[in-house]
Image (cartoon, rainbow, N blue to C red):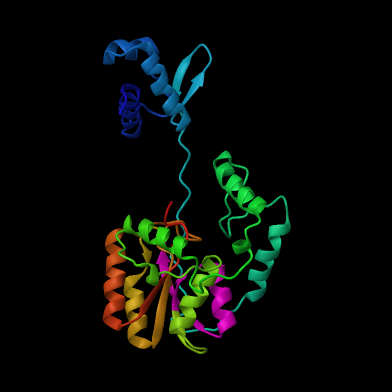
């Protein structure tokens, strides 16, 4: 860590601890330079870091001031869904959400879509263009039913970083995450079966369950700790649930990351009742 980063972290801690209060003027660049025994440019770089983090604001000819803190929005309240399996309803609302994507003045948060204008994607565009120019026949022909072997090998290598020891034969390539969810559901469920889902849940999951004629039992889900394990255990005891579907990382729509201890507790609970866990980990790499 560089000296300006160390200084920026030190000042940020002082702001968080309330030693520098909202709206208060911060020491001048020269004062901090003398206090910490660093150059003026180091202090300026540290202030620039804090400014990027929106912790401070500069005022011409006056110096730097602690930025006014915005009140944190309240977290969503825990839902209280009915504690029984139900058919998927409110389908018209889901269709309205999907059709609204065509409206240009609406910011879409219903699904993830990368910014295709970012320069980091240029190498990918070049590779795709090069492959198209070569007119290789394999681009238009069928390959292995489970996906291209080379791609599955790379996925297996990447999975090692997350602690998963997978072989090529353990991996199936699908056309997007939604198909993967559909295949997973069909592997363990039949029409009329019951799946436990988070409440609220990703609308795409509801689409899949409705299409397969599968009933859902909603489990109250906290916006910090994730799905209620207590309510889930009670549901396991009362109903023949075939699977529980969760989005523990970068949850859609609540946005939480489920604590590691609760992830392990969920796995232990599912193993005890012999229930499959279907994890939508589309944002796990983030």
Residue 4 against residue 177 in the figure, above or below: above
Which residue is at 33% across, 30% downward? 9
> Whole-percent x and y of residue 248?
40, 62
Side of 75 where 271 appears, left or right: left
Quick check: is 272 in the magenta stretch? no
Task: Please tell me whether residue 194 is drawn above or below residue 176 in the rendered image.
Answer: below
Answer yes or no: is residue 61 visible: yes
Q: In this view, does 46 lie to the left or right of 85?
A: left
Location of residue 56 in the rendering, given as x and y in whole percent from the top left corner:
45, 27
Residue at (35% x, 75% y) in the render: 231
Is residue 84 visible in the rendered image? The answer is no
Q: Give the range drawn in magenta.
A: 196-223
- Identified at 34% across, 34% down, the residue is 16
Q: Is residue 197 magenta?
A: yes
Q: 93 or 139, which lies in front?
A: 139
Residue at point 27%, 69% (across, down): 265
Query: Does residue 89 sit above or below 103 in this rendering?
Result: below
Whole-percent x, y for residue 201 in the image:
50, 68
């Amino acid at each position: 860590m560089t000296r300006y980063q160390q200084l920026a972290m030190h000042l940020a801690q002082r702001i968080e601890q309330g030693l520098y209060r909202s709206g208060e003027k911060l020491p001048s660049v020269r004062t901090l330079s003398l206090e910490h025994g660093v150059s003026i440019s180091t202090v300026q770089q540290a202030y620039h870091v804090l400014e990027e983090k929106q912790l401070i604001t500069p005022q011409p000819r006056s110096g730097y001031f602690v930025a006014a803190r915005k009140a944190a929005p309240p977290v969503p309240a825990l839902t209280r869904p009915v504690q029984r399996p139900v058919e998927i309803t409110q389908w018209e609302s889901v269709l309205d959400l999907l059709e609204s994507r065509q409206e240009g003045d609406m910011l879409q948060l219903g699904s993830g879509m990368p910014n295709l204008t970012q320069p980091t994607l240029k190498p990918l565009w070049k590779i795709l263009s090069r492959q198209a120019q070569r007119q290789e026949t394999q681009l238009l022909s069928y390959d292995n039913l489970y996906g291209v072997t080379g791609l599955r090998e790379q996925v297996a290598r990447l999975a090692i970083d997350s602690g998963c020891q997978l072989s090529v034969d353990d991996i199936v390539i699908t056309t997007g995450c939604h198909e993967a969810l559909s295949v997973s559901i069909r592997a363990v469920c039949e029409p009329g079966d019951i799946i436990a889902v988070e409440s609220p849940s990703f609308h795409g999951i509801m689409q899949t369950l409705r299409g397969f004629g599968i009933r859902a039992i909603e489990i109250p889900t906290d916006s910090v700790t994730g799905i209620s394990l207590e309510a889930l255990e009670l549901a396991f005891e009362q109903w023949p649930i075939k699977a529980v579907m969760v989005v523990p990382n970068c949850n859609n729509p609540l946005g939480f990351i489920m604590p590691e201890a609760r992830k392990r507790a969920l796995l232990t609970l599912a193993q005890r009742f012999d229930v499959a866990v279907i994890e939508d980990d589309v944002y796990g790499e983030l």
